[in-house]
Image (cartoon, helix red, strand yellow):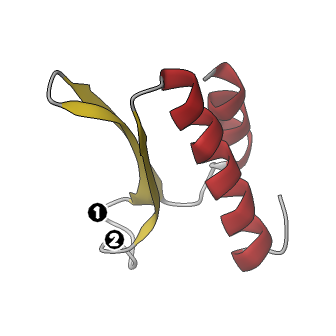
C-alpha cells in the first residue's frame, strides 16, 4: 500500500486526477483513478481494480497506473 501511495504522490502533481479507495462490508477493496470534476476529462476513468486482498489491490493499482503512464505519457 505504501509503495503505491508513495509512487502516486510522486507523479500526481498538476495532473487533475482523483483517486478513490473504497471498502465496505459488502464490497471488496476497490481503487479507481479518474479525473477531478473540474477537469475537462472528468467523466473518464483511467483504471479501476478490485480485490478482497488489501495488499494485492494496491499492487494491481500500481501496475495499472504504470502501464497507463507508459502507454499514454511515454513513461513515468
Depth check, front residue: 35 or 48: 48
x 64%, y 36%: residue: 59
Q: The C terminus lies in which quarter of the figure?
A: bottom right
Q: Which mark is residue 37?
A: 1
Q: Sequence order check: which comes first, mark 1 or mark 2?
A: 1
On screen, residue 29 above or below 72: above
Residue farthest front in this picture: 52
Decide if residue 44 is in sight here.
yes
Residue at 63%, 56% (x, y): give it. Answer: 64
Which residue was labeled with disc 2? Answer: 42
Q: Helix, strand, or loop for circle 2?
A: loop
Residue 25 position in % (x across, y down): 16, 21
Q: Secondary structure at mark 1?
A: loop
Q: Residue at x 30, y 74 (%)?
A: 43
x and y percentages locating residue 67 in the rendered image? 72, 63
How would you rate the neighbour count of disc 2 (Cα within 10 Å): few for under 14, some for 14-19, many for 20 or more?
some
Q: Nearer the viewer, residue 32 or 19?
A: 32
* Residue lying at the far left of the rendered structure: 26
Circle 1 Cα neighbour tier, 10 Å, few/some/many (<14 / 14–19 / ≥20): few
The reply to whether callout 1 and callout 2 are in contact (CB within 8 Å) is: yes
Amino acid at each position: 500500500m505504501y509503495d503505491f501511495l508513495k509512487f502516486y504522490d510522486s507523479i500526481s502533481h498538476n495532473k487533475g486526477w482523483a483517486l478513490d479507495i473504497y471498502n465496505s462490508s459488502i464490497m471488496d477493496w476497490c481503487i479507481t483513478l479518474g479525473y477531478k470534476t473540474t477537469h475537462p476529462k472528468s467523466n473518464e476513468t483511467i483504471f479501476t481494480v478490485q480485490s478482497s486482498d488489501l495488499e494485492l489491490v494496491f499492487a494491481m493499482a500500481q501496475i495499472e497506473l504504470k502501464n497507463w503512464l507508459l502507454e499514454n505519457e511515454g513513461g513515468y
